[in-house]
Amino acid sequence: MTPHLILYPVFALFYLTAAVLVRLAYLRLGATSRGEVSIKFYRTYDTGAEPERIRVVTRHFINLLEAPVLFYVVVILTYITQRVGYGMITCAWIYVALRYVHTAVHLTANDVRLRFQIYVASGMVLVVMWTMLLVQLLRS
């Protein structure tokens, strides 16, 4: 087993986050250049509003900086404690795949029910990952 295999899902999630950030920047620049949003709005976010299509991407970007922090931490802890195994690597890839699907749903059809189900599933994978790490550490 090569321990660094657990790090590849981290890169995959980072690139998803980066792609959403690029999309957000593109939408915001376009909206301000067309006069849909005043540049002043971005000073304090309290004068005016973004169009809904931009608010959805903004909210999604923020979401990619919230719960995934728990993913990054469990992966780093798994790596530094040398508890990397195929089960943890599989869970990491499942988590990242669910985040990609969540992004696709949120930024296209935005089916709230489906999006919530995917979000819950990804949260359950996180619980499994944290529990696997805890059990492995308790056994040592």
Image: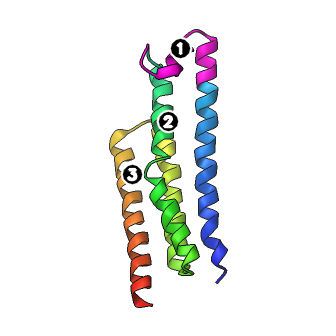
**Residue 18 pos. (x, y %):** 63, 44
Task: Report the mark closest to the observer, 3 or 1.
Answer: 1
Q: Could you tell me how many numbered marks the image carries?
A: 3
**Furthest residue toward front:** 44
Q: CA distance from mark 2 to mark 1?
A: 28 Å
Q: Residues within 10 Å of mark 2 (few under 14, many from 20)?
A: few
The mark that comes first in sequence, 2 or 1, is 1
Query: Can you identify the residue that label 2 sits on?
Result: 108
- The amino acid type found where label 3 is placed reads Tyr
Kindly identify the residue that appears in the image at 37 percent across and 66 percent down. 127
Under circle 1, the secondary element is loop
Query: Can you identify the residue that label 3 sits on?
Result: 119
- The amino acid type found where label 2 is placed reads Thr
Range drawn in magenta: 28-47
**Residue 61 pos. (x, y %):** 51, 39
Q: Residues within 10 Å of mark 3 (few under 14, many from 20)?
A: some
Q: CA distance from mark 3 to mark 1?
A: 33 Å
Residue 87 painted magenta: no
Kindly identify the residue that appears in the image at 49 percent across and 32 percent down. 58
Quadrant in the rendering for residue 93: bottom right
Task: Report the mark closest to the observer, 3 or 2.
Answer: 3
Q: Residues within 10 Å of mark 1 (few under 14, many from 20)?
A: few
- The amino acid type found where label 1 is placed reads Lys
The mark that comes first in sequence, 3 or 1, is 1
Query: Can you identify the residue that label 1 sits on?
Result: 40
The mark that comes first in sequence, 3 or 2, is 2
Under circle 2, the secondary element is loop
In this rendering, the answer to whether 136 lies above or below 13 is below
In this rendering, the answer to whether 12 lies above or below 22 is below
**Residue 109 pos. (x, y %):** 45, 35
Quadrant in the rendering for residue 84: bottom right
